[in-house]
Image: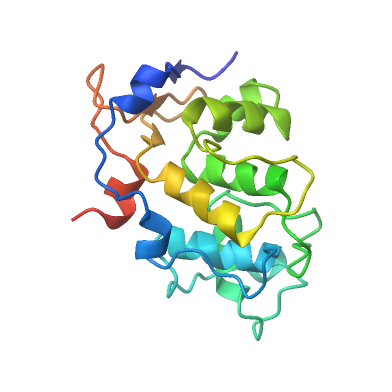
Amino acid sequence: MKRKLSILLTAGMIMGATALASDNFAEQYKIVYGETEEITRAEMAISLSNMLNMKNYEIAVPEEEKFTDVPETHPAYNAANLIKQLGIAEGYGENIFGPEDRLTYEQAIKMLVCALGYNTVAMEKGGYPMGYISLASELGITNGVDFIITDNVTKENLTKLINNIANIPLMEKIGFGSNPEYAVMNGKDGNALMTFYDKYFGN
């Protein structure tokens, strides 16, 4: 049986969210971390920890769950293991993350969709990569960004993608058990209004 989803993905739903974040959210909060024009997977992990307002967060990870190719001396050690524990990125399998690999658009979009809480919906739309790409388009994550999904992500376009997610309502689990319920926090149907910006940067 499919998980029950309290969700209606329409342009009206997205436009109904409050617009608390500025158009230059990523620049304002110095979210994107990148030393070159093309973003690496390690730089994406650090950018995501900045985006979640958890850049100084140290997470306790069981030894057997740590990425074996991201040592404690690596700048992305905490960030990479954080996004793994949050279910945003699983790596390549067998605890391999590939920190110095260039980040592709399909990888980046999957991570951003998961950061917003919509992983279950993306999986029901076909999973990786096209389920995530399709959902990202519906949510407005990819607005104004031209890309081929297998190309490497540029710093400029990652900034645009992150700016786009700021005012999107989160999807959160509202029920537990074998058939958990999920709801879009869009201020409708008895659900609270909570955008990404509200949760991580709101007062």
Q: Nearer the viewer, residue 146 or 56?
A: 146
**Quarter location, residue 124:** top right
Residue 127 shown left or right of residue 2 in the figure: right
Residue 113 locus on image (x, y percent):
55, 39
Q: Nearer the viewer, residue 96 or 61?
A: 96
Q: Residue furthest left?
A: 203
Work out whether 62 lies above or below 103. below
Residue 137 locus on image (x, y percent):
56, 29
Quadrant of the image containing the C terminus: bottom left
Work out whether 176 lies above or below 51. above
Tell me the colour scheme of the image. rainbow
**Quarter location, residue 46:** bottom right
Q: Nearer the viewer, residue 5 or 65?
A: 5
Q: Residue at x 81, y 57 (%)?
A: 94
Q: Residue furthest top?
A: 1
Work out whether 4 lies above or below 106. above
Kindly tell me whether residue 163 is visible in this rendering. Answer: yes
Residue 5 locus on image (x, y percent):
46, 19
